[in-house]
Image (cartoon, grey):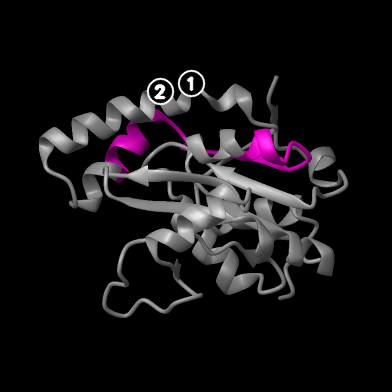
Amino acid sequence: MTDHLTGADADRAPAPVTVLAGPTAVGKGTVSAAIRARYPQIWLSVSATTRAPRPGEIDGVHYSFVSEPEFSSLIDNGQMLEWAVVHGRNKYGTPRGPVEAKVAEGRPVLLEIDLAGARQVRESMPEARFVFLAPPDWDTLVDRLVGRGTEDAEERERRLATAKIELAAESEFDVTIVNDTVDRAADELARLLGVRDLT
């Protein structure tokens, strides 16, 4: 049974690693960006990818850009907490080494990944805390997806069908945070990681 976030839950001892996942268009990236801006003491994991950098992307900040052989070597050596092939082309994943190094330093660690990645991390790091970011309601999720204007009608329908499946996975998570406003969701997530607002 998923515990919806309560004051008591926020006071539980933080896990060494917190995994944030949720349905498409729920705002995981936006909440993570708010965490990065407002809570610099929280370390956000940087995904590795085999794709080439896009204009403006910085290696080690937006992604760690690695070659196909390097990525394959990380997989073979058990150094990926989770990984996937996206759109049948490029590999993306979370390297284990930097995460374990930050945990050893005592830093709160946040992984923002998709549902499939979260399931892989649960297999390899069951001691992590798994947080489901949920929309306030279905209509809000649809409005956010349509409002982005980045997908055509067919792609939107495909993503909404995926979102229904992803929403059904909420019970797999330890805690649910409702993303009604970005700042409030970011603050709740930071409290789960044992961090209070410095302002």
Question: Residue 165 shows which numbered tag?
Answer: 2
Amino acid carrying mark 2 in the image: Ile
Determine which residue is flagged by label 1. Answer: 168
Query: Residue 185, can we see it?
Result: no
Whether 71 is drawn above or below 172: the answer is below
Instruction: Identify the magenta region.
Output: 121-144
* Residue in the foreground of this view, choosing between 17 and 170: 17
- Proximity of marks 1 and 2: CB atoms separated by less than 8 Å: yes
Whether 86 is drawn above or below 156: the answer is below
Q: Would residue 138 be counted in the magenta stretch?
A: yes
The image position of residue 189, as x and y in percent, is 66, 52
The image position of residue 127, as x and y in percent, is 79, 40
Q: Residue visible at 56% across and 73% down?
A: 37
Whether 25 is drawn above or below 172: the answer is below
Q: Is the residue marked by circle 2 packed among few (<14), some (14-19), or many (20+) residues within 10 Å?
A: few
Amino acid carrying mark 1 in the image: Ala
Q: Residue visible at 78% across and 61% down?
A: 103
The image position of residue 38, as x and y in percent, is 61, 71
Where, by quadrant of the figure, is residue 98 drawn? Answer: bottom right
Q: Is residue 176 left or right of residue 115?
A: right
* Residue in the foreground of this view, choosing between 28 and 106: 106
Q: Is residue 62 left or right of residue 34?
A: left
Q: Is residue 72 left or right of residue 132?
A: left
Classify the position of the C terminus by image quarter.
bottom right
Q: Is the residue marked by circle 1 packed among few (<14), some (14-19), or many (20+) residues within 10 Å?
A: few
Query: Residue 108, can we see it?
Result: yes
- The secondary element bearing badge 2 is classed as helix
Gap between marks 1 and 2 measured at Cα: 5 Å
The image position of residue 113, as x and y in percent, is 51, 47
